[in-house]
Image: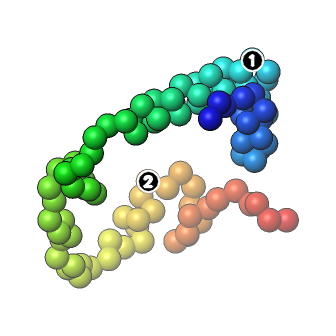
Amino acid sequence: MKITAANVEHVARLARLELSDEEKNLFAGQMDAILAYVEKLKELDTDGVLPTSHAVPMENAFREDVTEPPIGTEKALANSPDRADAFYRVPQIIE
């Protein structure tokens, strides 16, 4: 499938991006090259290759769930750029 500037424009519109004509042509060429490479990868013989979810064999990597005491308000707010008593102060966003 050949990617055109019109395809890029459609995707940009969906993503709410504003692109110049030069960017549309640049991205069309780049996306076309990516899809051409994917088509080339389809030519590889993958018979006998097992599907993997990780490049390195892994077993369960979860740690034991241990309950610990909370860190406390003062420590939690220690690096806050602005606070009001025991709360983070943030800019007002609702009128």
Name the residue at the right extreme.
95
Give, as a three-letter code, the residue at label 1.
Answer: Glu
Q: Which residue is nearer to you in this view: 78 or 12?
A: 12
Q: Position of residue 24 (x, y in %)?
A: 73, 25
First-in-chain label (2 vs 1)? 1
Q: Residue at x 49, y 55 (%)?
A: 80
- The residue pinned by badge 2 equals 79
Crowding at dot 2, Cα within 10 Å, few <14 / some 14-19 / many 20+, comes out as: few
Instruction: Using the rendered image of the protein, determine whether residue 37 is visible from the camera's viewpoint.
Output: yes
* Residue assigned mark 1: 22
Distance in Å between CA atoms under marks 2 and 1:
45 Å
Dividing the picture into quadrants, the one containing residue 21 is top right
Which of these two is toward me, 86 or 68? Answer: 68
Q: Secondary structure at mark 2?
A: loop
- Res 17 seen here: no
Between 89 and 26, which is closer to the camera in this rendering?
A: 26
